[in-house]
Image: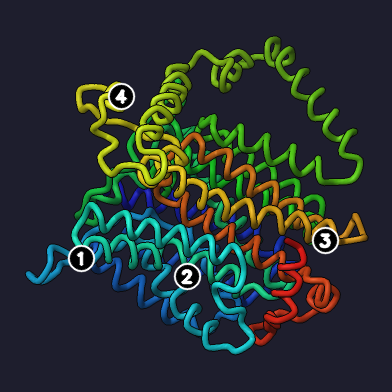
Amino acid sequence: MPEQFRALIVVLVLATAVLMVARPSLCPETMSGDDFSRRRNLWLAITLTAFAASNFWIYIVVTAALLLFALPREANRIAMYFFLLLAVPPIDADISGLGVIKHFFSIDYLRLLALAVLLPTFLSLRAEPETLKFGRIWPDRLLLAYLVLQFILMLTVSTVTNSLRIGVFYAFIDVFLPYYVASRGLKNLPALREALASFVVAALILSAIGAFEFVFHWLLYASLPNALGTFWGYGYYLARGESLRAVGPTGQSIVVGYLVVVALGFLLALRKSLTPAVWKLGWCVLLIGLVAPVSRGPWIGMVALIVVFAAMGPAPGKMLSLIVIAGLLSIPVLLVVPGGNEVIDRLPFIGSVDSENVTYRQRLFQISLQVVMQHPLFGAFDYFYSPAMQELKQGSTGFIDLVNSYAGIALSSGLVGLSLFLSIFISIGAQIFKAFRRQTDRDSEMRLMGRALLGTLIAVLVIIFTVSSITFIPVVYWALAGLGVAYAYMLAPEKAAARATAPSGPSTGFEPAALRTSWNQGR
């Protein structure tokens, strides 16, 4: 039997087991049984199509048909998007330009999801008179300024056709749509709760697959690009010490950890919606998924998430003290328990396994800073060819691994571009903080969600310091930014009480005037 079919059987068994446990656990607390069943069936059908199609374009066409068929039945499309987001790898191929141009654009699963699910939702939201118009609030303006800057800089170094493809079309599909639909499409607490739960389900499946790969030393999606007749530059076998690093459908082990940390943050937000047993079980599965890729950047991000969440809660001094004590006691315990030394060897900064990766990241930061200072305002398109960057070449291929999203932005668009990028998330984080601080009930679900979203946002900003914005990483942080905007507006003083009890559905609007007033006063 070909490898992709053996892998398909394992993926379907693991996913079915997770989904069988998740359905009674999450329904009806976070989503209806019908919605869960429809999304589950769609997840399974898309996965089956990817492994069985044996041709990339057949897989794309059939998957698009499945998505478009299911879309009209969805009341919460961002929840559908999150549920399906991690189903298959974003293996890509170019759509031919038919001799007119080299190619129209590159299509992969993430872009297909955006075109089939987010684009129709964007058009629908945009036509609703009660939807807050884009550009009326500061995060919108900062995002627009960032994208315009990227397009202008692209025009200075590339053709008009390529600049339009990358600076307009890709920016719209990959950046704008996840942000806009998440920020405008989630209009009340039940809708937000459902979206967070959908992402958690996707990450639970990812964690189960990652655990299998870690234990059995078999990457389940490694054979898929070849089976589809295309090439993908991710998804290779990579070890840390004697441990195989799980990658699942993400293509990179650090991406698995990144996604699991986001899901852990969302699970914190759902604590009041789930029974204690279900919530603890979810944490255990996701923590296994965090360990499986043996990736240290997400572990640091996880610590940031817990610290921020605890610091924003009741009795922050007590909780932070407990975290510090637990951290200090964990090292002596690991020194005496069987296998503890292996765990310590894999920890960041103090571990000895692959310690050169930490050294490389430190050198990358130092050298990138030197290169940025040569063109501080708007960067330089040819920064890779600078003598300083050449010092970072690795191996016989001379590959320079730019494992720092901030360095990549600063090198290509300067401190102006980096400042705009950071300002988007800082402004949203500030509004999340102000929104949940307005909640007088310190034990309310909305306050809990605010703490979790803020902690998740900060954790993501920490993790991307250790990885470039590849595969799922940018899509998720732009969608997370949109979730933060949606949350802040739900807690506008004029509508907070009404939104907390409003029924879920597409007819509940944002009431832009009141919300804009609240946002501006908050700033």
Residue at 30% x, 60% y: name it: 166
Q: Which mark is residue 388?
A: 4
- First in sequence: mark 2 or mark 1? 2
Work out how far the residue at label 2 is from the one at label 1, CA to CA, in angstroms.
36 Å
Question: What colour-coding does the image apply?
Answer: rainbow
Q: What distance separates the C-alpha of mark 2 from that of mark 3? A: 30 Å
Q: Quadrant of the C terminus?
A: bottom right
**Which residue corresponds to mark 2?**
42
Q: Position of residue 257 (x, y in %)?
A: 54, 40
> On the picture, is 411 further left or further right than 225?
right
> Which amino acid lies under the numbered mark 2 shown in the image of this protein?
Leu
* Proximity of marks 2 and 1: CB atoms separated by less than 8 Å: no
Q: Which mark is residue 445?
A: 3
Q: Earlier in the sequence, mark 1 or mark 4?
A: 1
> Of the residues tagged 2 and 4, which is closer to the observer?
4
Q: Are marks 3 and 4 in contact (CB under 8 Å)?
A: no
Q: Is residue 421 above or below residue 353?
A: below
Left or right of 197? Residue 62 is left
Q: Quadrant of residue 444?
A: bottom right
Q: Looking at the picture, tell me which residue is in the foreground, 167 or 247.
A: 167
The residues bearing labels 2 and 4 have C-alpha atoms spaced at a distance of 49 Å
Query: Which residue is label 1 attached to?
Result: 161
Q: Which residue sits at x=70%, y=10%?
A: 336
Task: Please tell me whether mark 2 sits on a helix, a strand or a loop.
Answer: helix
Q: How busy is the neighbourhood of tag 4: few (under 14 within 10 Å), some, or many (20 plus)?
A: some
Q: Secondary structure at mark 4?
A: helix
